[in-house]
Image (cartoon, grey):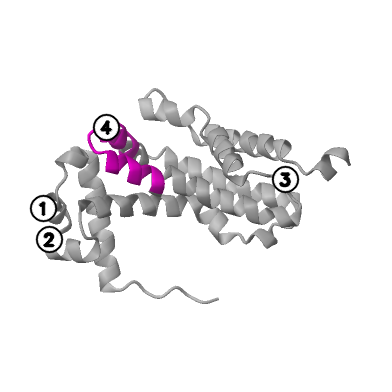
Amino acid sequence: MMQSPAPTRGDTRRLAILEAATEVFMELGYAGASVDRIVQRAGGSKGTVYRHFGCKADLFAEIITALVARMTDPIERQRPDAADTAEELAATLGRFGQTYLDVLVQPQSLALYRMVMAEGANFPDLARVFYERGPGQVATQLADYLGALQGWKLIAVPEPGIAAREFLSLVRSDLHMKALLGVGVPTAAQCELTVKRAVALFLAQYQPASERTG
């Protein structure tokens, strides 16, 4: 099995800046965060930050991109042609849904959501980048996966984009809203049960006609 290359010094520095920037954004909000503050937390120089990311807005976009990469990893690893049975498709959607929900209700993700909701009106570009790089990108990647499955006749989704958003809504249920409002952080058991129900409802809705009549 081929091993991933060892991280370079530049990779390590980049990760440290991202981690520091995430902490600063969550503590001070987007308006209150500055590159100077991030440099104080991460060490190094402003030049290093600009060389890796360009500006504060680019840093924020990279943080959201990293979260999305974690959410969508289960479908990125699964080739559509590898899900050649209904059971394998259900398992892949289950892994994706579980990872998506787990990341969504983590304190870091909730803090970023709250920050965007609080400051989006004053920083419309912030809200746009958050949606495009975050929820919008997750839906797009799931839609691409569902669309690629069409030829394998495991699922009938004439409009993959709509189907993807429906599945994500089922997975979020009311657990994400409650967590955002601070009125209830879901347990692992609640998340697992919600994802199982979401997968079952979704596959029943988009079951191929041959399976419905067979």
What kind of element bears circle 1? helix
Q: Is residue 174 visible?
A: yes
**Where residue 97 is drawn, which disc sits there?**
none
Q: Mark 1 points at which residue?
A: 36
Q: Which residue is drawn at 23% across and 58% down?
A: 17
Q: Position of residue 22 (x, y in %)?
A: 26, 48
Asked if the residue at tag 2 contacts the one at tag 1, i.e. Cβ–Cβ closer than 8 Å, the answer is yes
Q: What span is colored magenta in the figure?
A: 112-132
Closer to the N terminus: mark 4 or mark 1? 1
According to the picture, the residue beneath numbered tag 4 turns out to be 121
Residue bearing the label numbered 2: 46
- Label 2, label 4: how far apart the Cα atoms are: 28 Å
In the shown orientation, is residue 160 left or right of residue 7?
Answer: right
How far from the left and from the top, in percent, is residue 1? 55, 76
Residue at (24, 59) in percent of width and height: 16
Residue 158 x %, y %: 68, 44
Q: Distance between the residues labelled 4 and 3?
A: 39 Å
Q: Residues within 10 Å of mark 2 (few under 14, many from 20)?
A: some
Residue 156 shows which numbered tag?
3
Marks 2, 3: nearer the viewer: 3
Q: Which of marks 4 and 3 is nearer the N terminus?
A: 4
